[in-house]
Image (cartoon, rainbow, N blue to C red):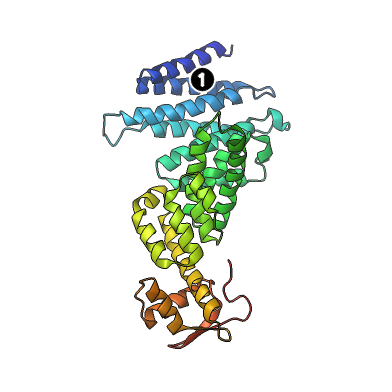
Amino acid sequence: PVPYNDILLQYFYSIHYMQQSQYIKAFNVCLNNNKKLFEVMKTTTNSSNWYIYIINRVSIQLRLCSYKADDIKVTNKKTDTSYVNQAQSHLLQYFRAMIVDRAKDISQSKKLGCLNIVVQLFKIYFKLNNHRLCTTLVRSVNNPNFPNFSTFPMSQQVSYYYYYGRLMIFDENYDEAEKALTFVFNHLHNINSQLKHQYPQFQHNMKQLLQLLIPVKLLLGQSPSLSLVQHYQLKEYTNIVIALKRGNVSLFNENLKEYQYLFIKQGVYLILEKCRALCYRNLLEKVYQLTDTDNKLQINACIKACNLLDLSHDVNELECIIANLIFEGHIKGYIAHNRCVVLSKKEPFPTK
């Protein structure tokens, strides 16, 4: 007989041990419970996936228990396997068994449990700082045989795209990162607008999301409104946004330096470093708008603008900056050494 009662009882035991701060006990109980449930899944031959909802719950519990158990682990022997690694191995067993299911009726397929397991594995891999292992999971999700995303709960979709967006940031695929994180923003924003009084956690989630989405948007030439930045109390981005809009490179550098450790912690410092080029681009565009002489940007005028911002660039340094902007596609034109930048008559300062 299927051990329904025992599975439920062991689940509550793991919760009890967690509440008593007996994290290793909680993990061992939870792992054994997951193993029992895995056997149930393997031995259930009829067209049914009723256990998927239970697996979703106990797999989350397994991950959380493994974190706590590792935090109090006292041994440092190299041969020991961490609790997080044990959890990861078992979650992979779930995934491998689910992904090969051949049920024709998707509503009865084991594959409906895959996305939750992928999300739990993403969280573990990011905690272990092993992003490479996420790539295999992404390939599986992108496989044509993977169920349509609309068949999964929205909470799982949002969680998947959040970590997928973070993964794309590490891969420097900012277009994909922007699409994924914008999907998360749109759905979180809708939930936050409707349920913000009942669920203040959404405010925290939105703030964490914007700490990634704002720098990606800025790098792609899209500027968030200051009201959005201020609403979510992201003061570190207030002057960054203002500086980019105005082309104030000095203000940009000051704020990048002031919040350097915070940006490094958020994992977006290198993205913001790349935004400095956009700040120079906007500065040069404003100089061009003020001094336009037959599609030529005078080098002397640019140096005067830099001096006003306390940027001590000589001609060679400035021409090097402009050359990089031309190479990166932020400016269309060519440099006439020591004299000017001859700009394209059509869109000399591309917006993207």
Q: Which residue is mark 1?
A: 36
Q: Residue at x 41, y 79 (%)?
A: 304
Instruction: Name the spot of residue 244 as percent of width and height, x first.
Output: 48, 63
Quadrant where the N terminus sits is: top right
Q: Residues within 10 Å of mark 1 (few under 14, many from 20)?
A: some
* Vertical position of residue 17 compared to residue 253: above or below: above
Q: Is residue 179 visible?
A: yes
* Vertical position of residue 267 compared to residue 202: above or below: below
Instruction: Name the spot of residue 331 as percent of width and height, x first.
Output: 54, 75
Using residue 57 as the reference point, say whether residue 48 is left or right of it: right
Using residue 142 as the reference point, say whether residue 203 is left or right of it: left
Using residue 4 as the reference point, say whether residue 28 is left or right of it: left
Instruction: Name the spot of residue 99 as percent of width and height, x first.
Output: 60, 36
* Residue at the extreme right of the image, as rendered: 105
**Kind of residue at badge 1:** Lys
Would you identify the image quadrant in which residue 101 lies?
top right
Q: How many numbered discs sit on the rendered protein? A: 1
Q: Is residue 147 visible?
A: no
Query: Who is closer to the viewer here, 306 or 129?
Result: 306
Query: Who is closer to the viewer here, 119 or 235?
Result: 235
Instruction: Name the spot of residue 349 as percent of width and height, x first.
Output: 57, 73
Would you identify the image quadrant in which residue 94 lies?
top right
- Under tag 1, what secondary structure? helix
Query: Who is closer to the viewer here, 108 or 156?
Result: 156
Q: Residue at x 64, y 22 (%)?
A: 50
Q: Residue at x 30, y 35 (%)?
A: 79
* Vertical position of residue 292 compared to residue 48: above or below: below
Quadrant where the C terminus sits is: bottom right
Query: Who is closer to the viewer here, 335 or 306?
Result: 306
